[in-house]
Image (cartoon, grey):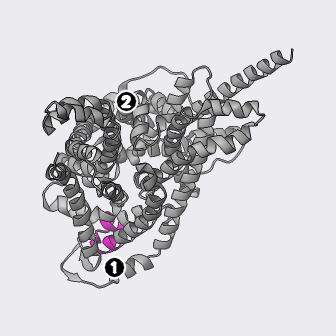
Amino acid sequence: MNSRLTKLLQAPSVILLLLWMIVPLGMTLFFSFARYNLLYPAPLSFDGLTNYEFFITDSAFFPALFNTLLLVGSVLFITVVLGLLLALLINQPFWGRGIVRVMLISPFFIMPTVNALIWKNMLMNPVYGIFAVIATAIGIDPIDWLAQVPLLSIIIIVSWQWTPFALLIFITSLQSEDSEQKEAAQLDGAGFWSIFRYLTLPHLARPIAIVIMIQTIFHLSIFAEIFVTTGGGPGYDSTNLAFLIFSQALLQFDVGVASAGGVFAIILANIVAFFLIRAVGKNLMV
Amino acid sequence: MMNLTLSQRKKYKTISLGLLSWVVALVFFFPILWMFMTSFKTELQAIAVPPLWTWEPTFENFAIVQERSDYFKFAMNSIVTSFGATLLALLIAVPAAYSMAFFPSKHTKDILLWMLSTKMLPAVGVLMPIYLLTKSAGLLDNVFSLIIIFTMINLPIIMWMLFSYFREIPKEILEASRMDGATTLGELRHVVMPLSWGGIASTGLLSIVLCWNEAFWSINLTSANAGTLTALIASYSSPEGLFWAKLSAASTLACAPIVVFGWFCQKQLVQGLTFGAVK
């Protein structure tokens, strides 16, 4: 096959992705310097850095940035640790293991809007929700999860949805672990902990890196879970950057400010991506 | 004697760990089970305190959901966008991934990494341009624009997956077929495709799952016409969300196909999600 044909076969995907990247990116960059609000039909005019100033000095900006990082960090920590524990737990044969595995990974296939609404209404409702019922039964005052601890609630919801993802990848990797090596270590008198520390954990290094990379990509722009539960509130307590930009754009119709926020989100994602690709992406190529 | 107690201890350990696994799994699965159960209750039974564990199941919620919000229309939109975007993406990605895997140049690695990096572009960063572009093209709330967007957001992952599958096909087979005088297209059709159907199928499956559950673009770009099931459920956030039985019925209908689908192809999905790096 000559190189012209190779290029021809690759051209559509490369050109389309390039367009998909450059056109909206260029427009976002352009709008971010423009005075452009869909509610005021004034002609589009150049506005310097006003939009950026407006977005960054918005009292919601720093809470949103902080919430974004806290959300990503906590969910990553919870899902990796919990996923690892669960994977180790179901890594030995027992009765009904297949069913247990299916039950554990199911939350991952539930769409985020459904998952968030089920938690919001049927579990976290302060009167009729299961948590409230359990709390009352054991004599504690039930709390209004989404009003009192909105960000924690969202962290719990998102972690519930993504732990199966980590588990699925860890358990697949554990099953390819060299069992002879483990048995040899056991005969030499190695305990559970040292086998885990010196054999299993190194074996899982790459899957863990992959889980962190993929989840970070998805968690930086968590939107639906916030949209259907707290709507970013109360106040800005559960607003992340994605939701803040959304509310600027489609609730206040301010294209300019929303675009400045967009540029900011892109920069943040790129900083994270830069390190992730360095750490993980190159590993994937083998 | 010593041996017996050791094996007995081992047996007890296995049983207790198995029991623990079951308890954890049931707790984890509970929200889904509860949703499923609630969808067969009346509204009053749904909010009963203490919760009802046995009751006479009713199917009226499903009928009401279909009647009020035309479930089948939203389901159809979900099917059309998921399958449409998956087919389109495969059509674009298969030739490209094939040529990258079998005829790599020194840029191949960089191109693939660049493609993955477009996935890191946060959707919300380009919300306004995409919204305005689709609006000015008259494609707001249109299935077609969703298909294009879903294709583009999944293309990088699909490229990676296909690339990692194609790479594992032994090159000697291709050389042999070339010796026999096969053309490039013939090679693709008669040698590569039959060998990689499994890989292409699991790539397609993953893409369908991702499209089906996509929420950001479907909530922001659609309403009554092209709304997908994620958008339909989002509309239940208020005030219909207070009607738990109906919410549960709609949710069960929206998730059941893809959850069952996911159960059957866990293994392929793992390979896909990790670009073949974990097997």
Element marked by disc 1: helix
How far across and down, in percent of the image, does residue B103 sit? 25, 47
Give the Cα distance between marks 2 and 1: 46 Å
What's under tag 2, amino acid-wise? Answer: Phe
Q: Answer above or below: position of B118 versus A125.
A: below
Tag 1, which chain? A
Q: Quick check: is A250 in the magenta stretch?
A: yes
Q: Magenta region's main secondary structure? A: helix
Q: Please state the horizontal and vertical placement of residue A106, each as a whole percent of the image.
A: 47, 34
What residue would you read off at disc 1? Answer: A51
Q: Quadrant of the N terminus of chain A?
A: top left
Above or below, A231 relative to B72: below
Circle 2 residue:
B261
Q: In this view, does A249 lie to the left or right of B96?
A: right
Is residue A232 at least partly visible in the picture?
no
Location of residue B192 in the rendering, given as x and y in whole percent from the top left corner: 24, 34
Count neighbours of disc 2 (C-alpha within 10 A) and say few if under 14, some if 14 to 19, many if 20 or more: some
**Residue at position x 37%, y 58% in the image:** B120
Q: Start and end of the magenta stretch?
A: A248-260
Q: Residue at x 59, y 49 (%)?
A: A78
Amino acid bearing label 1: Asn
- Depth check, mark 2 against mark 1: the one in front is 2
